[in-house]
Image (cartoon, grey):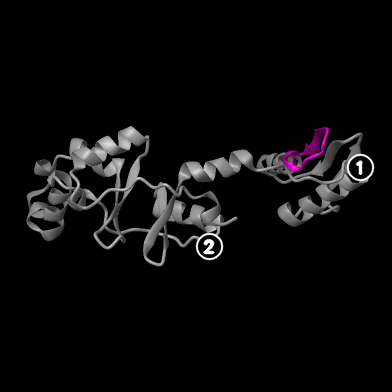
């Protein structure tokens, strides 16, 4: 799935000359937590988030170390906190994507850069935006893996996935299926591995239940 398949196309945006007060009202009115900022040429020149605005309430620039206030970075911070316009308060470093970007990469970018939204830009112009909520919707709507409900097909599917995904071949665990109910038995290394097996089995559609007969290794006490 690509960014263009899940992005919001009707994007609420701001301009650099908009006041931060009006930008905050715009966020509240539309129930959003961030605004892409569009310049006179129609290009995205920044992002204004609720975090940027909250800094204006929570940060006390005057209490910072005097040496920091003397340097350029300190003064830029002062302008960002106390300037009246969106252009002064916004973050001009924009992480953006193209419409054909895979949604998996979008999620990785959000995690890597610790951001909540990514503008979608095509030929220099904003065509959409993807937020974390859009990615959460994919989790909610994700279908179970569908396979045949035949017991033999279920057993083969579970055994294959255990081997490929978790490295648990038939030499470590045994899978049996009766009337759609999956049973896995054998010795596993950790309780986390046991939980991973359950997660894998329950993700497969068509099962009628799961019976966990795995066990942890018994460590002998030294004499």
Quarter in which the N terminus is drawn: bottom right
The quarter of the displayed image where residue 139 is located: top right
Depth order, front residue of 208/49: 49
Q: Is residue 116 magenta?
A: no
The quarter of the displayed image where residue 207 is located: top right
Circle count: 2
| Numbered range of the magenta stretch | 202-223
Using a 10 Å C-alpha cutoff, classify the residue at mark 1 as few (fewer than 14 neighbours), some (14 to 19) or many (20 or more): some
Dot 2: what SS? loop
User: In the displayed structure, does residue 104 sit left or right of residue 21?
Assistant: right
Spot occupied by residue 187 in the image (x, y as percentages of width and height): 79, 44
Spot occupied by residue 40 in the image (x, y as percentages of width and height): 24, 60
Foreground mark, 2 or 1, reads 2
- Disc assigned to residue 100: 2
Distance of label 2 from label 1 (alpha carbons): 38 Å
Spot occupied by residue 148 in the image (x, y as percentages of width and height): 87, 45
- The tag earlier along the polypeptide, 2 or 1, is 2
Q: Residue at x 84, y 40 (%)?
A: 185
Query: Does 147 appear above or below 123?
Result: above
User: In the displayed structure, does residue 196 sit left or right of residue 49?
Assistant: right
Residue bearing mark 1:
150
Dot 1: what SS? loop
């Amino acid at each position: 799935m690509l960014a263009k398949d899940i992005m919001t196309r009707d994007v609420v945006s701001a301009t650099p000359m908009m006041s931060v007060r009006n930008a905050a009202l715009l966020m509240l009115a539309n129930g959003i937590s961030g605004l892409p900022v569009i310049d006179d040429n129609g290009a995205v020149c920044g992002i204004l988030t609720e975090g940027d605005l909250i800094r204006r309430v929570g940060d006390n620039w005057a209490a910072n170390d005097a040496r920091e206030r003397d340097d350029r970075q300190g003064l830029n911070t002062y302008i960002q906190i106390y300037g009246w316009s969106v252009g002064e308060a916004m973050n001009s470093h924009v992480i953006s994507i193209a419409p054909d970007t895979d949604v998996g990469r979008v999620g990785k970018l959000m995690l890597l850069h610790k951001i909540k939204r990514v503008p979608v830009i095509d030929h220099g112009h904003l065509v959409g935006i993807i937020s974390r909520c859009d990615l959460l919707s994919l989790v909610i709507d994700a279908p179970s893996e569908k396979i045949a409900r035949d017991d033999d097909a279920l057993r083969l599917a579970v055994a294959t996935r255990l081997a490929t995904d978790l490295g648990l071949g038939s030499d470590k665990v045994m899978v049996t299926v009766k009337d759609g109910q999956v049973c896995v038995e054998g010795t596993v290394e950790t309780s986390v591995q046991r939980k991973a097996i359950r997660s894998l089995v329950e993700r497969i559609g068509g099962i009628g239940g799961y019976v966990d007969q795995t066990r942890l290794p018994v460590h002998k006490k030294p004499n």
